[in-house]
Image (cartoon, coloured by chain):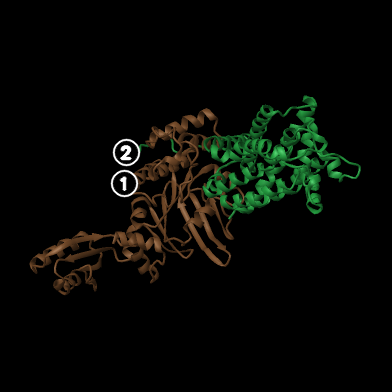
Amino acid sequence: MSTNYAVEAQGLSKRYGTTPALAGIDLEVPTGTVIAVLGPNGAGKTTAVRILTTLTDPDEGQATVAGYDIRTQGTEVRRRIGLAAQDATVDPLLTGRENLVMLGELHQMRRSEAVTRADQLLREFSLDEAAGRVTSGYSGGMRRRLDLAATLVSRPEVLFLDEPTTGLDPRGRSELWTVIGTLVGRGTTVVLTTQYLEEAERLADDIVVVDHGRIIARGDARKLKREVGGDQVQVVVVEPDHLAEAARIIAEITNVEPKVDAGARSVTAATSQGVETLVLAAKAFTRAQIPVDDMSLRQPTLDEVFLTLTGSTTTDDESSNYIDEEA
Amino acid sequence: MSAITISNDTVHEGPRPARGMLHDTWVIARRGLVHMKRQPEALADATIQPIMFVLLFAYVFGGAIDVPGGGNYREFLMGGIFAQTIVFTSFGVAMSLAHDRKNQAVDRFRALPIARGAVLGGHAVANLFKALLPIVLMSLCGLVIGWRIQDGLVNAALGYLLLIAFAFAMIWVGVLLGSVVSTPEGVQGIGFGVLFPITFMASTFVPTETMPGFLRHIAEWNPVTTLANAARIQFGNPTTEITPDAAWSIAHPAAYSIIWIVAIIAVCAPLAVRSYQRSVAK
């Protein structure tokens, strides 16, 4: 067993009743890196996190976290990890400071040390003004920040973040991304789960795509996007009459049969040439004198990644809703 | 909103040595006590409710109830409401466990390097403190309406001790209840549907002598009756008359209550710990 890996797992399986939640997952996370576990709801992301943080025993398979066996050395594992579960779990009846002090004490700090650490984190997370208020009155973003601060009280070696930005507004999301980026720069290993490819790309060195309890793809964002055909170029024309001509132009540039949506007056196709595609398209549409409402390049959504990797879309309502908003 | 800046100190450092079960238990107990302070409405079963029962029964029903041997009903009443309130201790424990589960506190604790049993221990200690609150409040309230300790402070102290011991036993009933029933609403349902009637089918408010045969048997062997009667005896207050043909439980209320305390702890505590652990380890 190598100590260069903060997390090492082989063949983790877990079933609830007859439903397999995890069907054999292998994972290697080098120390000081970030891995994103990407997948729709119900893919097994949370189950994997629960197993690695010793909250649930796997039915089969084995894993070490920070070099300790999750089955037989649970306490040693718990001393070295921080966990931010999917729903913010700070105590709603305690103040922000009380929450952090309690966690410090439960991490076996002296009270004075726990208080110092709590105040430091509250300052760093811009929560010092709200520190004396009970957290049930916090906004969603504040609670998330406190939740993340709580996982850092003990200065953990491995941080598990289960969908850390779900439910945050765009600003809260980018703020949290900055924090996570900072932590990683200081040598903490981070395992995070997410439904957003954009988030995985932004934060992770490595991405593992899971579906139905299995890993269906892994690699960095560039590799994954190459596999799914790169970015999507989308052109919205002003006149519906121009759709056919627009589709012909896009097909010529991308060498791909584009998708035409008459209702949205849009033509969409995958492209591997990035911004170059937009430049070519802009020229072509000007030449053809076709008025355009919008022309954009966007990342493939999780749904599109899945469509390519599995041949089926995510069936989950929540993730589809998100994708609808984005698209 | 100002930006988040993480300081430059080392992000992780070696873990600290364990400080032991008592330390962890006390940290979690303190949290429980803060919860009670922040939610006065959740303390109603330990504050307003017993005092309300004392006043209602002393002034509204009291005049219509005859105490065996012709004693003062208000003195008879206090032992009953002490016993009833102590039984409700289990309700409070079950509610705190159910709220923990609802708020996902359970998982947060389980991912921490704390001593086994510290979470349950913390709840037990906090709720034992909570049980002391109504005992003090009701004693004061009783003194105001004419209740007196008639048989010396030593006997009275033993009476209080018996009540506290029974509260400790009821904590494990509460843990069991809170592990089997997972939602606060469910706990509330069982509290009012089961616990409440049990405390009424006893000598809590009325002497058992006036109950019809079948119900009287139940009441006489109901530990709430014997706990109430034992407290009355210790405080030197009027209680159920012990006739030569009285049931053993009525003749030896303190001994019978202690048997219940031991039995509840022996049976419920291991069962409660196991079912709690199973309920959280999904």
Going 47% across and 29% down the picture, which residue do you hit? Answer: A116
Q: Above or below — where is B113 with respect to A268? A: above
Q: Residue furthest front?
A: B64
**Disc 1 to disc 2, C-alpha distance:** 10 Å
Q: What residue type is labelled 2?
A: Met
The residue nearer to you, when weighing B67 against B259, is B67
Q: Is B227 positioned to the left or the right of A164 in the image?
A: right
Chain A image colour = brown
- Residue at numbered disc 2: B1
In terms of image quadrants, where is residue B133? Answer: top right
The residue under the point 33% across, 51% down is A202
Question: B209 or A196, which lies in front?
Answer: B209
If the image is split into quadrants, where does the C terminus of chain A sit?
bottom left
Disc 1: which chain?
A
Q: Which mark is residue A140?
A: none
- Compared across the picture, whether B168 is left or right of A83 comes to right
Residue in view at x 62 percent, y 46 percent: B94
- The circle drawn on residue A171 is 1
Q: Is mark 2 on a helix, strand or loop?
A: loop
* Residue closest to the far right: B244
Amino acid at the residue labelled 1: Arg
Q: Position of residue B112 (x, y in %)?
A: 55, 43
Q: Estimate how packed mark 2 is, as few (under 14), some (14 to 19) or many (20 or more) residues with alpha carbons within 10 Å.
A: few
